[in-house]
Image: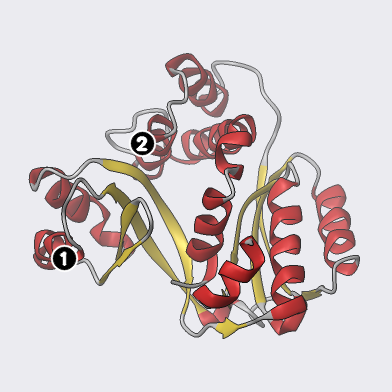
Amino acid sequence: MAGHSKWANIKHRKGAVDAKRGKIFTKIAKEITIAARLGGGDPGSNPRLRLAIQSARAVNMPNDNIKRAVQKGTGELEGQQLEEMMFEGYGPGGIGLLIECVSDNRNRTVADIRRILGKNNGSMADAGAVAWNFSRKTLISVEQGGKSEEDVLMAVLDAGAEDVKATEESFDVYAPTDSFEPVRSALEAAGFTVTAASLEYVPNQTLELGGADAVAALKLLDLLDDYDDVQNVYSNLDINEEELAKMEG
């Protein structure tokens, strides 16, 4: 496990995900609004919106919240003029960062991201300096339900999945972006319960950190994730289990 997924697992083990449910709802609502604005309010003909709504339901986001977010995107309800943006940067130990943002004020967001990085042993990078090391992938998480990693792999191999990784509470299935629907359908047909689905930037090569650099890197990732304009943060950070156990202890 590495990059964004490993960091997400660390946060989950610390109980941070439940504590930040309100922020999760806000971020998903922004994604729904953007998706509806760009591709229309019908999830049947808008794959990005369909995925965003599925993510919302996976975290038990109320239907009224989902409906309002869609209506803001289609113009049925008044809302902020949101803009998507991606920043590249470096963090402690030289890890690469991709920072996805949605904002109503680009200048503010650029300045704030630069400040957060600068105060935490990081820096902004030129476009393409970090992105070359990442590939866009579908990530679908399912409940383990007493099944094995091999059971999941057998269910999704013919549907186009590339990899399956076990976490403490789920199996994460990785696939090309155009294989989202076939893989999801194959998982459901095999009786697996989908708990999350998203498009992720997955590092092609990771960088293992330990000691003070690892602690500083996780602190920076948390600070970026806590910033309201940030939707997702991806990195090529890797921390081995022994080092992680020390940090959690």
Would you place residue 128 above or below residue 184 in this image? below
Q: Residue at x 24, y 60 (%)?
A: 179
- Using residue 147 as the reference point, say whether residue 89 is left or right of it: right
Q: For mark 2, does the 10 Å Cα neighbourhood hold few (<14), some (14 to 19), or many (20 or more) residues?
A: some
Which disc, if any, is residue 153? 1
Report the number of numbered marks: 2
> Where the N terminus falls, by quadrant?
bottom left
Q: Amino acid at mark 1?
A: Leu
Q: Secondary structure at mark 1?
A: helix
Q: For mark 1, does the 10 Å Cα neighbourhood hold few (<14), some (14 to 19), or many (20 or more) residues?
A: some
51 or 72: nearer the viewer: 51
Which disc, if any, is residue 54? 2
The extreme front residue here reads: 249
- Using residue 77 as the reference point, say whether residue 70 is left or right of it: left
Q: Secondary structure at mark 2?
A: helix
Image quadrant where residue 88 sits: bottom right
Image quadrant where residue 55 sits: top left
| Mark 1 vs mark 2: in front | 1
- Marks 1 and 2, how far apart in space? 22 Å
Q: Amino acid at mark 2?
A: Gln
Which disc, if any, is residue 74? none
221 or 45: nearer the viewer: 221
The image shows residue 246 at horizontal and vertical percentages of: 63, 70
Q: Are marks 1 and 2 in contact (CB under 8 Å)?
A: no
118 or 220: nearer the viewer: 220
Would you place residue 86 above or below residue 94 in this image? above
